[in-house]
Image (cartoon, rainbow, N blue to C red):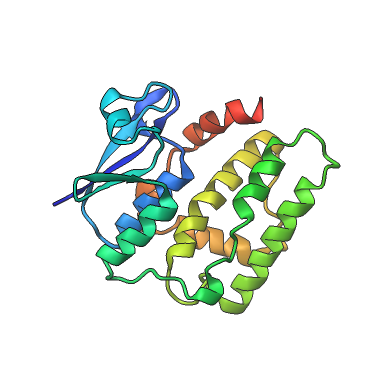
Amino acid sequence: MALEVAVKAAVGAPNVLGDCPFSQRVLLTLEEKKIPYSTHLINLSNKPQWYLEVVPKGKVPAVKFDDKWVSDSDVIVPILEEKYPQPSLITPPESAKVGSDLFDAFVNFLKSKDPNDGTQQALLAELKDLDEHVKNNGPFVAGEKVTAVDLSLAPILYHLVITLDHFKNWTIPQHLAHVNNYTKLLFSRESFEKTKAAKEYVIAGWAPKVNA
């Protein structure tokens, strides 16, 4: 029985997978656990009525478990782990918070209009911490195998790499070699290839927020 999963449709292309990193996190978890699923692409600027009836706030991602739709990747991922324990993607507690501030630091820098507001330094500090952690524990956050924290960071790093290059002509510094290698490792996984949004849709998804 395939799980039903609702994810964001691409901006301007409602039949194509969109750029939501939290949607991709859920899809990555399903792929890594080899759980069969079918996707509903939700156009966030024109949400279907049926979806608003089952997920009143209309947020994505959402997964249907036993006739009940559950939204929020932070809620969905632990349920998937509990219901489908093999292969385990549990991150050991000491590594569970690694990179947890990266998304906010990335978004703050991406939206920043003032080069001296400290947002770039804050992002670099986050990336440096991640670099140091992967250097000491790698190749993944918790060692040799992929865990939930990697599947959470992979889409964030993907968005970071694409949008900062496009909107700010900025790339992760080369001296952060461990982060750069970690990023390549994540992006080369089959699960990632299957679940990533195309580059142009990542840019289209962020453009209104960046230009606001």
Q: Quadrant of residue 101?
A: bottom right
In the rendered image of this protein, does residue 8 appear above or below residue 128?
above
In the rendered image of this protein, does residue 89 appear above or below residue 24?
below
Residue, x 45% and y 26% (percent of image)?
11
- Quadrant including the C terminus: top right
Residue, x 34% and y 71% (percent of image)?
88
Number of marks drawn: 0
Residue 79 locus on image (x, y percent): 32, 59
Q: Quadrant of residue 16?
A: top left
In the rendered image of this protein, does residue 65 appear above or below residue 178?
above
In the rendered image of this protein, does residue 18 appear above or below residue 137?
above
Residue 120 locus on image (x, y percent): 76, 48
Q: Is residue 112 visible?
A: yes
Residue, x 29% and y 23% (percent of image)?
49
Depth check, front residue: 28 or 80: 80
Query: Quick check: 194 left or right of 21?
Result: left
Residue 155 locus on image (x, y percent): 49, 50
Residue, x 71% and y 43% (percent of image)?
109
Q: Is residue 138 visible?
A: no
